[in-house]
Image (spheres, grey):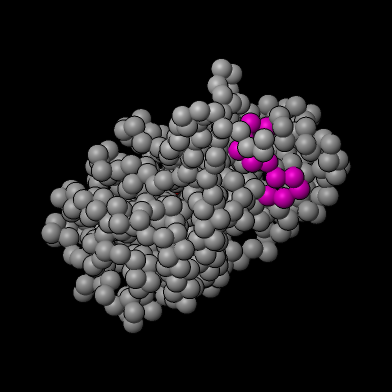
Amino acid sequence: MAGTGVFADVLDGEVYKYYADGEWRASASGKTVAIVNPTTRQTQYRVQACTQEEVNKVMDAAKVAQKAWARTPLWKRAELLHKAAAILKEHKTPIAECLVKEIAKPAKDAVSEVVRSGDLVSYTAEEGVRILGEGKLLVSDSFPGNERNKYCLSSKVPLGVVLAIPPFNYPVNLAVSKIGPALIAGNSLVLKPPTQGAVAALHMVHCFHLAGFPKGLISCVTGKGSEIGDFLTMHPGVNCISFTGGDTGIAISKKAGMVPLQMELGGKDACIVLEDADLDLVAANIVKGGFSYSGQRCTAVKVVLIMEAVADTVVEKVNAKLAKLKVGPPEDDSDITPVVTESSANFIEGLVMDAKEKGATFCQEYRREGNLIWPLLLDHVRPDMRIAWEEPFGPVLPVIRINSVEEGIHHCNASNFGLQGCVFTRDINKAIMISDAMESGTVQINSAPARGPDHFPFQGLKDSGIGSQGITNSINMMTKVKSTVINLPSPSYTMG
Ligand SMILES: NC(=O)C1=CN([C@@H]2O[C@H](COP(=O)(O)OP(=O)(O)OC[C@H]3O[C@@H](n4cnc5c(N)ncnc54)[C@H](OP(=O)(O)O)[C@@H]3O)[C@@H](O)[C@H]2O)C=CC1
Ligand SMILES: O=C(O)[C@H](O)COP(=O)(O)O
């Protein structure tokens, strides 16, 4: 159970502590932040509202710990990460319980998130050993005007203190996707978890604590992003920011200092369906892609652009599948569960009402109880409707009928987002050409968008992000190249 057994140290009465200098602590602020259960809409947990002074101390400790960690052999760093991964997987049940209560993640998916996170950490340890163990040797005579009298040795060195800010929808997995790469590369790590999801994240951090990482190397400060976010992201002690979330990331990019940024932001992932597609496959992927975790995935299918000739058939198949989805609480492992907050539900409802006023066809009756919104397919959506462009982050999916592939590509590329997209066709040549034409970080052929497997590159264009994630890319991003040049008194050539 959450907050008990090995996790008892994390809890202080009814409030979860924050983690600094290798210890669980109560904030001197005396203030707490409530985490509201999306299903019951009652306060489920409370976390500390950390002060600026506490953030300063965490940054100081992170700086000191990083210096020693950077000198810790790579294999030892990897060993500790493997240990943390095993502990995380061992304690998947209480951590998953937090995900169910804090973010209404369906019970089975909550367990999968924790297991996937353990696997991600282990893979990161292995990948780090491989890629950080290699450097480059350059010789000078490849550049005009030079003889071979300079040898340049370059390798990757850590950046320093990495600030990690994940979103509510994967508070564990999108935290470790930043923590793992930062640590294996020799950085220290300060985590600011999302408020909804903070308790799951604190439990995950405790698994790193139990693994025996040095004091101060990992810290976790809690509090509302709107209150301590700016102080953290603009803190002079931060050497790199890895953020996943919404438009907040755009604001952070404008305020942050001269530090490397990794930003994974929103998306409006388009699903383009051609006449020759396998329509059963299309319907299955629209339902899985658009409605799993109630559409609260940045990689969810967020607009279907379908050729008119096959639209009726696909809409009918999708509706038949939607009718079978289980709607209800996450504890029952329902397919559709309450969305994360009331304001999120209100926002989704606003998009639905706008589409209604402008004449979209409702394939199901719109139904909402509290934060629970029943799955809804909106057909005959037109570009003048907000839902054609905005990301609902909920179980509501617009269908736009198109008469040419170009029309679909045009709609996709007119979006300010460019995270992922997908195309369904049996013609691989057409699929490749459409993929090349779509302005998005990844295009899936004959499957719904997805970030995983976690070692694949994952990136967004335009307002969807800066840089690229995925295990290898994140390790590289959290390092910089350091060169040492050996200057010989006279040119030297091998073999004669
Ligand atoms: N591309 C991707 O990989 C993903 C993108 N997303 C996008 O994220 C959005 C939904 O996630 P959500 O969590 O609501 O996103 P938000 O941008 O609201 O929050 C993300 C994180 O930022 C924190 N935060 C809030 N304000 C600040 C601030 N001023 N400075 C620093 N940090 C701050 C939040 O903390 P707090 O909770 O305390 O406010 C949270 O930890 C959607 O737009 C979705 O598309 C989501 C997942 C993945
Ligand atoms: O946060 C998100 O929504 C993701 O990064 C998507 O991950 P997924 O494709 O594995 O669900």
Residue sitting farthest toward the bottom: 5
Residue 49: x %, y % from top left: 22, 56
Q: Residue at x 23, y 67 (%)?
A: 23
Q: For this view, does 465 lie left or right of residue 202?
A: right
Between 282 and 350, the residue placed more toward the observer is 282
Q: Is residue 353 rendered magenta in the image?
A: no
Residue 442: x %, y % from top left: 64, 41
Q: To which quarter of the image does residue 238 belong? A: top left
Q: Residue at x 72, y 36 (%)?
A: 435
Between 200 and 477, the residue placed more toward the observer is 477
Q: For this view, does 403 lie left or right of residue 417?
A: right
Q: Residue at x 63, y 37 (%)?
A: 494
Give above or below for 249 relative to 316: above
Q: To which quarter of the image does residue 321 belong? A: bottom right
Give above or below for 391 relative to 402: below
Between 318 and 354, the residue placed more toward the observer is 318
Residue 39: x %, y % from top left: 43, 64
Stretch in magenta: 438-448
